[in-house]
Amino acid sequence: MKNISSKIAAVAFLSILIFACKPHVDVPAPSKGSLDLTRFVTIGNSMGAGYADNALYYKAQEVSFPMLIAQQLRKVGGSNFVQPYVSPGSVGIGVNQNARYSLQPSADCSGAISLAPVAIANEGDFNVFTTSIASQGPFNNMSVPGAKATTTLYPGYGNPANGPGNFNPFFTRMASDPTSASILSEAASQNPSFFCLSIGNDDVYSYALSGGAMDVITPSAGSPGFGFDASIDVIAGTLLSNGAKGVIANIPDISALPYFNTIPYNGLVLDAANAAALSAAYAPLGITFQAGPNGFIIEDGNAPGGMRQIQAGEMVLLSTPQDSLKCGGWGSMKPIPNQYVLTAAEITLANNAIVSYNAKLKAVADANGLAFADVNSFMNTVKTGIIYNGVGINASFVAGGAFSLDGVHLTPLGNALLANTFLKAINSKYGASIPMIDATQYKGVAFPNP
Amino acid sequence: MKQVFALLTICAPLLLKAQGFQVNLQGQKQQGMAGTGTAMVQDGASLFFNPGAVSFLKQNSISVGVTPVISHANYSDASSSTVSETNSPVSFPFTTYMVFGKKDSKLKYGLAAYTPFGSTIDWQDGWTGRFALTHLQLATVYIQPTVSYKINDQLGVGAGFVYGIGNVNLQRDMPLVDEDGKYGHATLDGNAHGFGFNAGIYYQPTSNFSIGLNYRSDVKMKLEDGDATFEVPTSMASAFPSGKFSTSLPLPKTVSLGFAYNANKKLTLAFDATMVGWKSFDTLAFDYAQNTPYLADTKSPREYKNTFSYRLGAQYVISEKLAARGGIKYLMTPVQDGYVTPEVPDASHFNYSFGLGYKMNTRLSIDASFTIQQMKRTDTNIETQMSGTYRTNIYMPGISLNYNF
């Protein structure tokens, strides 16, 4: 008997050693500093809406960067954060009424099979646009795909009666009254105690993404609803009117996005015979080709013959149909159409606008004592490449892990890192210690198991 | 009540600060005295501590021992404040020492098999450092045939040939995910072997004072034809072909100088100073037989530096049958700031040992020891950019049986 009890004692002793004597943990206590986080509201565009892989869909909304910020705020007493979710099973819908993309093995025009972004359905889920979910609101995340600083002010921005192109169906579905509400009025009616303002990208991106062929860049000057600066003043003034605190983000350079830098300008690789044949064909325009990489031929109304060779620094956009480049003679036998190219002049216009917008956004943050999230600097860091807990992340299309399959919007991993940029700014401005997100828990581009 | 107090003592945050993946667990008598033994003639463990002292052993013996290593580690990520734990694996380094020779002969022979280096760590699923490491099991065994010669009553020399065998299994997740959220996983597994030697001089100028000098050479463990297995989304399988890999792991040389002093018939004090030549571990390189644009050979900097340890031990003979032992050891870490990894979250630290020896009869004796080690290390790794604090508690209860003949 004594033997048994001593055995039990020995087993108990060893069990305690194995299970009990774990090392202590001392992590700093989280704190919200001087913040009131009871009503957190975000105003933004597709970047904040959880739009990714060229569509608004549930899984991407779940990891929108405002949602990820809100999850961290909740650790220091932040409020619930309501988002205008698309139904979980939906294929989503994009600005071209397309379904979301996924990476799939697909054959190109020459029959070669490689992984490429492919829409997962023939068309997007129109129920998203036709079904109002306003009853689920108000929505803390007032980020609306396509919203500009100017259109954030528009009453009736979701009113279908305005006619196609004159209302935003992504807002219609969530607006309490699409005929009269503006994004700003919906946000203001929630009387935010803390806000995140990440707007202005589309004031220049909708121009840049379309190769300068559609839309115009919002001018800095001009009255509210027309000029960028005055529109920002109205938005910030409204959000600040009840003494709210907040964080304001700036706008990343277009060159940081894979959409603008994945296809090399000199991607026309020729052998000597083809170079000679093309040189002969283009002799009247004075364009010559060499064996090896050459600049593509692009459309340019100002050039003789309406076409010219693209120059270093100019951009062929990711939207360019790949089969047309590979087999359709685009960029060689015929020029790449204007909507797929940003010329040097167009890039200068876009860059100048971003510099001007960013100066305004910083000035508003400083003047009102708000936190400032330098998203531009963050995106440039990603472009250079970062290492996060053993994971290499950069701005390469697909392989880089930060950008989703549209080359503009972020992956869950990219959103987590972006949200940390905001959280750092908030912590340092408001003396808070809100924990950062463990970004390793969020994925990059998903690869198929065909 | 007493046990409770003992546990509290063990679990209390002593705020102590191992030494690479060296396993300092050899003879139980020596371990009870904090790993001193270079200048002592206790038992067959001298085959490890100082082959020069083996010729002074009065009896032939065979001993077997094992020390379960129970380790708990955690990692607090600095920015996210998330805490990850290890699954507290237990490893079982063992020792076998055999000494034989004709009675009164100046020449003794020995055979030893022991675990000089090893590490077992297994981090919880999904932990923040899983792209650096999820699992490491490194086990090595040295087999050492030895000859020791007693030049005179004061001086002995000895040397052994070391054949090292080892197995390593290293696993990590890969940041390649499929649509179900399943991440890729890499497993490197293989066997290694290498050669070296262990030589020592034992000098006993008076009956109560002795000096020992021991040199254990480095052993360059070569691993060839290991198996590299990559589980990745099938669309990326050709980018990460499973196949063979090779690597090498330099197990460092160790130089020890020890002193022992018999204060009286009952009390013996011992002091050892040891240098470990960890500087040889500058890079962990993996050479894959089949490279692809995605799967390149890797070279990870380790940049270990040479380190020292200091050990102070005491033995008190309570009765003819019973001896009590205790000791304290300070070990400097070979891992420099910026190079701390989840493989070996090492820090300079003290550890504390105590032990008991009991002679059941003239032939059979039993020895036990208990060693406690606690470490804390805060670092930002240059290669992985992991920034946080590792804490490790290790408990090493050991036991051995010794048979004299």
Image (spheres, coloured by chain):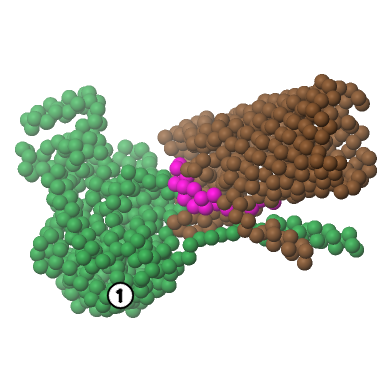
Chain colours: A green, B brown
A162 in magenta = no
Closer to the camera, A94 or B85? B85
Q: Is residue A349 left or right of residue B86?
A: left
Residue A437's x, y, as percent? 43, 59
Main SS, magenta region, reads strand
Amino acid type, label 1: Pro
Q: Residue at x 82, y 48 (%)?
A: B324
A431 over B84 or under it: above or below: below
Between B64 and A143, the one lying in front of the other is B64
Image height check: is A313 above or below A93? above
> Which quadrant: the C terminus of chain B?
top right
Q: Which residues are magenta?
A: B377-401
Q: Quadrant of the N terminus of chain B?
A: bottom right
- Residue B384 within the segment the image draws in magenta: yes
Q: In this image, B93 relative to A199: left or right?
A: right
Q: Secondary structure at mark 1?
A: loop
Say if B328 sits above or below A45 in the image: above
Of residues B157 and A119, the one nearer the viewer is B157
* Residue lying at 52% horizontally and 56% vertically, measured from the top left: B76
Residue underneath mark 1: A192
In the rendering, at what x and y percent does residue B267 appear? 82, 43
**Residue drawn at the location 87% of the way across and 48% of the way down:** B318
Residue extending farthest to the top is B151
In this view, the residue farthest toward the right is B361
Image x and y of residue A129, in percent = 28, 69
Q: Nearer the viewer, residue B89 or A175?
A: B89
How many residues crowd mark 1 within 10 Å: few (<14), some (14–19), many (20+)? many
